[in-house]
Image (spheres, grey):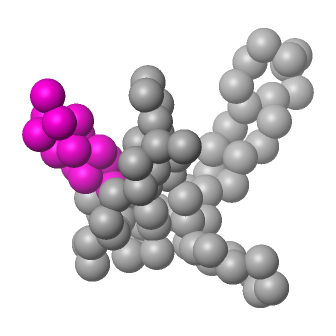
Amino acid sequence: MGMCLDSTPEMGEYSVEVRRESFYLRGEDSYFEERRHAIQVYPSSEGRHSQGTVEILIEDIPKIRAALDAVENYLLNKS
């Protein structure tokens, strides 16, 4: 398990967990209704070694940017 960062209002529905060499970025946490603010991942049809496609709402760009800033600030302050 990694370090779950505190969400900020700028991050909206998104949350971040920092791992050793990567991080998880999660959208809305809802299993019972359709999630509008989520990161959809589609597998690649080109073969098992390609990474596929990620779909993010354009309106969520500032929220994603805030989440990435939180990861960067955490890593800079950690060292």
Query: Which image quarter holds the C terminus?
Result: top left
Name which residue lies at 69% across and 79% down. Answer: 30
Left or right for 41, reference 16:
right
Q: Position of residue 42 (x, y in %)?
A: 77, 43
Q: Measured from the top left, where is residue 38 in percent x and y?
A: 60, 65
Relative vertical location of residue 21 with respect to residue 29 in this rendering, above or below: above
- Hey, which quadrant is residue 61 in on the image? bottom left
The structure residue drawn at horizontal position 72% and vertical position 31%, both measured from the top left corner, is 52
Assign the magenta stretch its main secondary structure: helix
Left of 39 or right of it: where is 25?
left
* Figure check: 5 above or below 9: above
Task: Please state if 32 lies on the left or on the right of 19 as rendered.
Answer: right
> Residue 15: x, y in percent?
44, 63
Q: Judge left or right: residue 57 versus residue 79.
A: right
The magenta stretch spans which residues?
A: 67-79
Location of the N terminus (image quadrant): top right
Q: To which quarter of the image does residue 60 belong? A: bottom left
* Residue 67 shows up from this direction: yes
Q: Is residue 74 magenta?
A: yes
Give the residue at x 34% y 58%.
5
Q: Nearer the viewer, residue 43 or 1?
A: 1
For residue 65, say whether it is visible: no
Front residue (pair 6, 42): 6
Say which residue appears at 31% left-offset and 66% top-offset: 6
Q: How many marks?
A: 0
Q: Nearer the viewer, residue 67 or 3?
A: 3
